Image (cartoon, coloured by chain):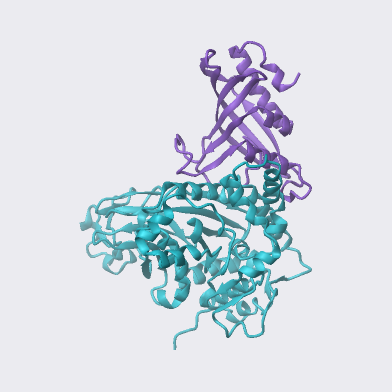
Amino acid sequence: MTAAAIAVAPVTEQALAKFVYTEARLLDEARFDEWLDLFAEDGVYWMPLMPGQTDARLHTSLMHEDKLLLRIRVERLAGARTYSQQPPSRCHHLLQQPDVVEMSPDSGRYQVRTAFHYVETRQDAQTLLAGWATHELVSTQDGLRIAMKRVDLVNSDAAFGNICLFP
Amino acid sequence: MSKYRENAAAIRALVRPGEVHKDLYIDDELFELEMEQLFVNAWIYVGHASQVPQPGDYFTTTVGTEPVVMVRHSDQSVRVLVNRCPHKGVKVAGGACGNTGKFFRCPYHAWTFRTDGALLSLPLRKGYEDTGFEDCEAKSGMATAGAVHVYRDFVFCRLAAEGISFEDYFGGALSTIDNMVDRSPEGRLEVAGGVLRYMHQCNWKMLVDNQTDTCHPMVAHESSAGTAVAVWNRAPEGTPKPMAVEQFAPFMSPYEFFEKMGIRVWDNGHGHTGVSDSIHAAYSPVPGYWEQMVAAYGEDRAQAIMGDVRHNTVYFPNIMVKGPIQTLRIFKPMAADRTLVESWTFRLVGAPDELLARTCMYNRLINAPTSVVGHDDLEMYERAQQALHAKGRDWINVARLAEADEAETLEAVVNGTSERQMRNQFRAWVRFMTPEVQA
């Protein structure tokens, strides 16, 4: 069953949770092209720099990627000359049960908040990041799509080494 | 066993006309000596006056590995104090920044200090009578930087009490700061947009070398900037070019572009790429900005300011400034194999917001720990930091386009793929690591 097919049925809380779990699993399995397909064409992946940040334009962030920038990242991961990914990084998401914050079936918009531990590893080094993912999901004819994935790391303003994949 | 301490000859021998010794990047003793000599004798960037606008405002940071606090004193001047209580050594100013009112108060025993560092009061003062306290180090309060100089709101300090003057140290290199500040219609900058902090497991000088390394972008950044160009080239005809692509694409400019744009060097280790062109030269104009600049400066001067699009200016030892996009990076030494990179951005006061938006995007795309461009570079630095420990070879090569008379020619403009600026940095490194003993 593809990720897209999962949420064609009526959108229930269970379907929203299943979407969030599936999105994480695609990343953990390095199925980045399928993960990219989960984003709406105008979807955004936002990792703020400051806790509680509201301004993504006049304040910088760790990531604020539209689908073009996400596509650049995904294609680069598979590149023959992407030396910083030879060997590749791998990731692991451990999620608390997603909490449906808002359900608006009339407008087809849903908001889900999920606490997570995220591990990224490359060679002998492992990095643990913790935080909350807030998904703004929209209902489309092809199923649920991500309008916005906001990732708030609990230590967002700390000094990090490389973060190569997608918490 | 000491290899370099009190051995100026051994230190000088580490820098040859076309090669530098690997110990510059991997030796712990040399790192300690850099913190004792180079970062004490040279002028080091501390922060920006806009971070401490009101009396009592303070900002904590490091100069080398020395913890300092930059503070606006009651007489409106900016001071740089060593952030260490003279009593038991506690960091008096806590947190990143704040306002301390008229004095600092150490949270351990409540000793207080004026914002120029002078000891103000301490509880139960009678207990120090007839104890020889008057002759103790503690009597003189918090230590201060030897000298502080604020140039167009850029705060620099020299920790050493005596040494080279600010003007002699920077000379004509200050023109980069001038251009960046002049890009504001009001001739003023403000720190804005947040700071990105990126930990690197490599020596700080490896990062500084990279700033004027023009033979690596088209190779090391092929995977990032090259992919951006490839993805963009598939966009439907007529799609407006996104700002992100405008910022990525020039990294893939060919060798000829970098050769022609040139490198300029100044005395004391400063220099910049992009004399006649740069990767920042062709960003889309922001509506209203040119009109503001003409109104502020007149058309000729505005043209001269905007036409100066220099790329990376290294202010020796450890900062890099990009005037055209208003970013400043500090390569903070932490250990021989560890560096914290702080990437700051500025608002051009009076200019349209869109310029700050562009600057914040640039900082994120290129300087964040999530940056694909940053990942390319950090992989190279870490591989170098590891392999430099190999026993079989001792030297790093910096001979590209080396000329015989470089040590005597203090200022020059040369081919943009020269490693001249790296050699310039190393000559300055020797100078400030082995200061002449005053007769």
**Which residue does the image show at 50% across and 53% down from the upper left?**
B285
Quarter of the image where one finds residue A105: top right
Image position of B36 (left or right of B182): right
User: In the rendering, at what x and y percent does residue A151 appear?
Assistant: 55, 33
Residue extending furthest toward the bottom:
B439
Residue B371 in the image: state x and y as whole percent.
61, 47
From this viewpoint, which residue is outermost toward the front? B238
Residue at position x 45%, y 44% in the image: A58
Horizontal side, residue A112 vs residue B3: left or right: left
B244 vs B434, nearest the viewer: B244
Q: Chain B appears what colour?
A: cyan
For chain A, what colour was chosen?
purple
Quick check: B8 above or below A20?
below
Question: Quadrant of the image for the C terminus of chain B?
Answer: bottom left
Residue B399 location (% of width, % of height): 70, 75
Q: What residue lies at 74% left-to-right and 31% top-to-bottom? A: A29
* Residue B308 visible in the displayed image: yes
Is B338 or A30 nearer to us in this picture? A30
